[in-house]
Image: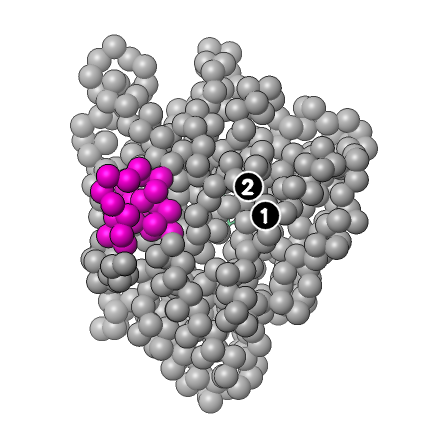
Amino acid sequence: MPTFDIDWVRAQFPALWQEVSGQPAVFFDAPGGTQVPQRVIDAMRDYLATSNSNTHGAFITSRRSDEILVAAHSAVADLLGCDADEVVFGPNMTTLTFALSRAIGRELKSGDELIVTHLDHNANIAPWTAIEELGAIVRYVDIDCGDCTLNMEDLKRQLISRTRVVAVGYAANAVGTINDVAEIVRRAHRVGALAFVDAVHYAPHGPIDVRALDCDFLVCSSYKFFGPHCGALYGKREHLERLRPYKVRPASEKIPDRWETGTQNHEGQAGVAAAIDYLAELGRRCGSPPTSSRREQLLAAYGAIRDYERGLSVRLIEGLVKIPGLTFYGIREPERFDQRTPTVAIRMEGHTPRELAEYLGVRGIFTWDGNYYAINLTERLGVESRGGMLRIGLAHYNTADEVDRLLAALKAIGRKG
Ligand SMILES: Cc1ncc(COP(=O)(O)O)c(C=O)c1O
């Protein structure tokens, strides 16, 4: 098996070559948005230079646009393991989820229940609480604060025959916990509820197979997996055909068109396809034969990404928990690292998360502070009124040296604190 070629990976991403005050920049802000390979920039520029047009016209640039959008749907279908017409593009996850929740709301009756979780980004909560005004009741699944995992017993208690939707994150953007999504989908289906999965934080770190999960909907955002600012929603064909989206009359009733409200971000979709091609090439470089399908290549890429990121997580977390005065939130035992992404959240005695982020930022290390919209979680952990947490979020383009630089900087400020 070829080794993970980190030099090749880093050479793909021009943003990583930047410096801050004479030091290479360290991008530990991946959960907020990843950097993009050069081919994504090229694909977006080429689209605007040679194909820029609206769709379904009787001339060459319009035909090229049609082809590019078809290719983008099929690239996302390979990423998620579904058919191309089950892929709905939109501006971002939040907007797609509001559109879907409104459409589902049209079918709900007063007293129907929806389940969300305290672990999730608010974009997987607010669209569901928004339809409480139609008479639905939203229930919240609690977490175990010790390791920031979902309390599955609580989920079991909340699931009843009136539950219509279970909305859950694949992985938590604040603390990196990966949920047992397949089990949650099974439990939702057992009471006849729809299962909606927010895979925004998970998508850059692990393979997604919507058929194996059997989820009804799954949503992700390409700017979190090395592409531009576009969202994509998978929906089971039967639901995309049956539910009634809010749409304009002349727009096609075919799927996915009936869900793709207004003119889409064409250059963005060109970029999404290029990001997925980058991952497929990584898969070939990690041992997937050139003759294998793009889906197989993507699975190989994710296998390699997971192994590589796990090494970084071990180094990062083992280093962090040894720093005096540091509080670590989430799963910390290496033998449980298949239940987490390389995204970690900490606090340090004597410093607010903002002070830490600023201290690291001037040293060229980019982290995030606050609640990152996972506000139920920061409230539940009792840190919301104290500046939240410092989030360190790695991607497969980061290195062990970068982890060591961060640890050294945190140790130094710990001593000053
Ligand atoms: C887990 C998770 N869900 C949803 C969102 C919202 O995604 P978008 O910005 O595409 O609306 C984010 C963004 O940070 C996220 O991390």
Does the magenta segment cover residue 329? no
Which residues, given as a range, are shown in magenta?
277-302
Quick one: quadrant of the N terminus? bottom left
Q: Is residue 171 left or right of residue 105?
A: left
User: Is the residue marked by circle 2 packed among few (<14), some (14-19), or many (20+) residues within 10 Å?
Assistant: some
Element at badge 1? helix
Q: What residue is shown with label 2?
A: 213
Percent position (x, y) of residue 356? 47, 74
Q: Residue at x 76, y 43 (%)?
A: 159
At 31% from the left and 39% from the top, the residue drawn is 294
Give the image quarter of residue 167: top right
Is residue 415 visible from the viewing direction of this image? yes
- CB-based contact (under 8 Å), mark 1 and mark 2: yes
Q: Position of residue 332 (x, y in %)?
A: 54, 71
- Give the residue displayed 62% in from the left and 26% down from the top: 103
- Please say which color scheme the image uses: one colour
Residue on which the image places disc 1:
181
- Horizontal and vertical percent position of residue 330: 58, 67
Residue 146, image x, y percentages: 66, 69
Q: Residue at x 37, y 47 (%)?
A: 299
In screen coordinates, is 356 left or right of 289?
right
